[in-house]
Image: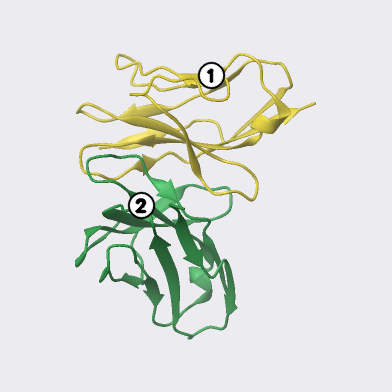
Chain colours: A yellow, B green
Amino acid sequence: AQRVTQPEKLLSVFKGAPVELKCNYSYSGSPELFWYVQYSRQRLQLLLRHISRESIKGFTADLNKGETSFHLKKPFAQEEDSAMYYCALGPDTDKLIFGTGTRLQVFP
Amino acid sequence: EADIYQTPRYLVIGTGKKITLECSQTMGHDKMYWYQQDPGMELHLIHYSYGVNSTEKGDLSSESTVSRIRTEHFPLTLESARPSHTSQYLCASSDSGDNEQFFGPGTRLTVL
């Protein structure tokens, strides 16, 4: 079955601390993985996708096919990073399967 | 400017009313989607469309219906709203051959 698991509903860190938001997926084919972010009172927007291999706002994510993971990382969290983060899997059926989301709180 | 528009942004109505949530996009995308999301919770796909006259039900069963008569327009209708329909509804679109989806601002629906 195709599934995305985000084990943490809430992740709280202090400003300047490293952040890792976990995402594991279940899919037998070649996956396409995304991270979406939803800031307070803003629409859901793409943060990054694995095929672009970019660093956006200091965030990176590496696809690990062996561990079926796509964890989102940032070495030094900022208060403006506080938001809901959703990992999404794009199988070849043109639909996205979203995880349950992780709320990141960055305290000053 | 290329964007996705949803109206109304907020809607409070009584039980039994018929409502239509509007979604339009000027992105030139073929694929469009409707999600249901409770605040801070996961997204559930309820409808999607690959193009004009194409509509499919999503993973979450919904009493709503959709239509796709024009490429840029993908309205969602509830014939008889109930309190259980209270939620946020997100519209999204994507280009053919690409899985990246672009989201509208959402409609927050409250049924009393």
Which chain is home to disc 2?
A: B
Left or right of residue A8, residue A76 in this image: right
Residue furthest to the right: A108
Marks 2/1: CA distance?
A: 27 Å
Relative to the observer, which residue lies in front, A97 or B9?
B9
Which residue is label 1 attached to?
A73
Q: Nearer the viewer, mark 2 or mark 1?
A: 2
> Where in the figure is residue A89, as x and y percent of width and height?
34, 35
> Where in the figure is residue A69, as x and y percent of width and height?
38, 21
Left or right of residue B20, residue A9 in this image: right
In the rendered structure, which amino acid carries the disc numbered 1? Answer: Lys
Relative to the observer, which residue lies in front, B34 or B81?
B34
Which residue is label 2 attached to?
B93
Query: Which image quarter is the N terminus of chain A in?
Result: top left
Q: Secondary structure at mark 1?
A: strand
In the rendered structure, which amino acid carries the disc numbered 2? Answer: Ser
Residue B59 seen anywhere in this rendered image of the structure: no
Q: In terms of image quadrants, where is residue A106?
A: top right
Q: In terms of image quadrants, where is residue A79?
A: top right
> Where in the figure is residue A24, as x and y percent of width and height?
39, 26
Residue under the point 33% across and 21% down: A68
Residue under the point 39% across and 36% down: A88
Q: Residues within 10 Å of mark 1 (few under 14, many from 20)?
A: some
Query: Which image quarter is the C terminus of chain A in?
Result: top right
Residue under the point 54% across and 21% down: A59
Residue under the point 36% across and 19% down: A63
Q: Secondary structure at mark 2?
A: strand
